[in-house]
Image: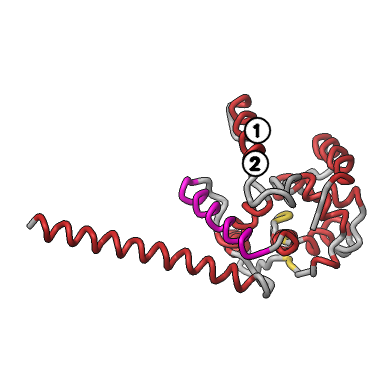
Amino acid sequence: MGKALAHRLKLGLLAVLLLVLAWQGWYVAWVLWWRHFDPGTTHFMALRLEELRRKNPQAELKHQWVPYEKLSVHLKRAVVAAEDDKFVDHEGFDWEGMQKAIEKNQRKGKVVAGGSTISQQLAKNLFLSASKTPWRKAQEAIITVWLETFWDKRRILEVYLNVVEWGEGIFGAEAAARRYYGVSAGALGAEQAARLAVMLPAPRRYEKNPYSAFMNERAAVILGRMQYSEVP
């Protein structure tokens, strides 16, 4: 009886292992596909669209892909300055930034800083949800490794700028530039780019008052740092 139970346990563990490997293989397959083909949508976009359609069944997202070379260099520099100033140097994780975020959150007594890199944020946007469960964070880390392994920094930043949320139903740089400034993503000026970059941590909240004192101050800081940002 003991041997039979042990055998069943081994088979069970093997089945779980094979399931996990198959699941991770699914992620890897999509990462490899999107290395060469642009994502038409993401899991995060699908979740937001579902939310919007609960209120309005006819709702649609605003999203238009723009190749990397046609995106404003000001926007690239602004986003790196605001979200991940070590983007071109790290391998997906900014350990120092994470430690600083943890210390800041401890001082404030609540979560006010995340410390996630652009690569980590992209992993979440492509495949996951906004939940903060340990499982989701672990899966995010694994996908981040795949992205950094199979994509170069240029591709990571290109996809990120084209799929990141920039307001209620607004995804990607082109839709954001049209929505807030009436120009293409390639025509964004330095100050416009800085203002878009500071919206990223909470775009649906910040779009309600984009010229608040906080947003003005933060945009000025990013504007001053952009000249030092290194982009692919």
Q: Which quarter of the image is occupied by the N terminus?
A: bottom left
Check disc 2 and report the residue beneath it.
Answer: 115
Identified by mark 1, the residue type is Lys
Image position of 150 with respect to 145: above or below: below
Side of 232 where 34 appears, left or right: left
Residue at left 62%, top 24%? 107
Residue 157 is situated, as x and y percent measured from the top left of the image, at 73, 59
Residue numbers of the magenta segment:
133-151
Image x and y of residue 55, in percent: 61, 60
Image quadrant where residue 32 sits: bottom right
Residue 70 horizontal side relative to residue 46, left or right: right
> Please, what secondary structure does the residue beneath circle 1 have?
helix
Residue in view at x 68 percent, y 52 percent: 118
Tell me: 180 left or right of 4: right
Dominant SS of magenta comes to helix
Sequence order check: which comes first, mark 1 or mark 2?
A: 1
- For label 1, the residue is 100
Give the residue displayed 81% in from the left and 45% down from the top. 210
Q: Outermost residue toward the left?
A: 1
Pick whichever, 150 or 157, lies toward us: 150
- Find residue 127 and report its horizontal and vertical position in percent: 56, 61
Q: Are marks 1 and 2 in contact (CB under 8 Å)?
A: yes
